[in-house]
Amino acid sequence: MHGSTLVFILLTAIVGFAVLAKRFSVPYPIAFVLGGSLLTLFPSLPNIRLSPDWVFLIILPPLLFAGGWYTDWKVFRENLRPIGLLSIGLVLFTTVAVAAVAHWLSPSLGWAAAFALGAIVSPPDAVAAGSVFERFSIPRRILAILDGEGLVNDATALVVYRFAIAAALTGTFSIGNASLAFVFVSVSGVALGLAFGAGYVALLKILRRFELSDYMLDSVLSLLVPYAVYLFTDSIQLNGVGPSAVLATVTAGIFVSRQSSKVFGPDSRLVANSVWTLLIFLLNGLVFVAIGLQLRDILHDPTFAARELWIGIAVSVAVIVVRVVWVYPATYLPRLFSARLRQREGVPPWNYVFVIAWSGMRGIVSLAAALALPYAFPGRNLIIFITFCVIVATLVFQGLSLIPLLKWLRIDSGEDIEKREIEVRVGALRAALKRLRELEPFESVEEWEVEGRIVGEYEYRIAHLTGHIEGGQGGLAGGVAIDHRLQQEALEAERREVERMRADGEIPDEVYRKIEYDLDLANARLS
């Protein structure tokens, strides 16, 4: 089967699984993994081996950069303590616990190999949990902690992973060297990410100053930057240890995101947002379908799978239990001994803590790290099989159970995000009105007339948005509904007329596309 045919099959499968996921309200990653596993039943489909280089160098950089881009830095900074406890403390605790369980159940798996397995399965996948939470109104702090954990924990796990591999192959290990290396890897990774982010922002400012940029060039550059950061950082090695490419890429994404309003024009932001939304969806689809497709390769020896399945189940249970055991003491013990912490952060209810404890789904980084083990690594096949078991168990079991659990636990953010958004819009409009008033008095009648028209438009938009907030409390809600209907009818009339002119050959496609784009923006504002 040609590679192009295989890509077509995979993309078609992603669309089909996405439709089924939407129809049955199943998170996309779970549907993709299950669907990919079912595809392995087709005998004509070739074995697909997921290359670690393909994941680490092609798939991971844009996912990391996008994760940093959409991170709320203020909320991230406020929750740095719990994020650190999860992304560093829990990763190390899980690594040790899994290593102990795996070595106990399979003594032939040496301690170094057992620690490598622990590092491989210790970092949860933030994408999987996020796909479940997008259907619910979750407190922002829970989302911030889980997203922050997902951004940082990969770096911790990969440092432990590298030292475990070195220990297994050379027979030497130093806890002091490992600790120093972790500090160096983390600090240098963040520093390089900041440097790349600052350089990218400076380049965009220069291009805009000399009018050399447009929305297409900005979009292409935004796709190149994650790879540039990751590849450059990953290429630096000092005595086998280098800066964290994961942290560098995430840091660059956070930095550029905070500066985006100053360096990107409106058109660039609109186009880039659409490009990145599609890219992230396709990458996640390919990744999670590819995880499912590994089933045939992993189960090529059915007797091996049947013989070692109980170890995979035991390690999966250990991974789930260890997270619960860690999260509750890590949440309540610091508050028990610190009144200042209780006053500053409050005491979260047990059900909120349980959501964090139960959101430990594993994903692509774990599988890629397992497949990246050298072929001569002791117990490699067993480690890959156990990793697959952990991914399926946590992703499918925990992912599907999260949905009814969130309903049963009555998790609610208590925030009306739509109302808050409207309040911000109204505040911005009032600031604009204030600025227009400051420009008075005008010298010409024409300026007064133009200002009066603009003020009237702003006052109308404020009244329109206020009607949304007030809802059914007065006559404005009905007015807003009528306004929406009439504006929608007017826009549709515009669209029909432009389409008629295009069909009759009165206007070229270039003109039609520009007008259609403006009509689409107007329609988006209505919704």
Image (cartoon, rainbow, N blue to C red):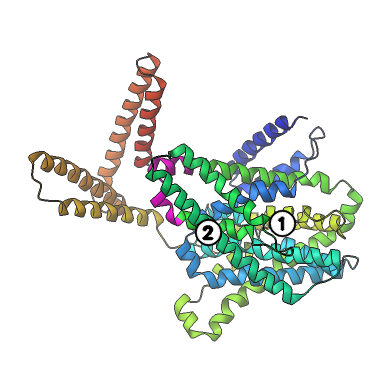
Outermost residue on the top side: it is 504
Residue tagged 1:
366
Tell me which corner region of the image, top left, top right, bottom left or bottom right, holds residue 509.
Answer: top left
Calculate the distance from the C-alpha at mark 1 to the C-alpha at mark 2: 28 Å
Quadrant location, the N terminus: top right
Q: Position of residue 137 (x, y in %)?
A: 48, 57
Left or right, residue 212 beside residue 47: left
Give the secondary structure at mark 1. helix
Q: Is residue 408 visible?
A: no
**In the depicted view, which residue is nearer to us: 198 or 74?**
198
Instruction: Residue at 22% x, 46% y: name it.
Output: 458
Region rendered in magenta: 258-274
What amino acid does circle 2 point to?
A: Ala
Q: Position of residue 515 (x, y in %)?
A: 35, 28
Q: Is residue 264 magenta?
A: yes
Q: Is residue 494 magenta?
A: no
Quadrant location, the C terminus: top left
Q: Main secondary structure of the magenta part?
A: helix
Position of 194 relative to 97 (above/below): above
Left or right, residue 164 beside residue 273: right
What amino acid does circle 1 point to?
A: Ser
Residue tagged 2:
195
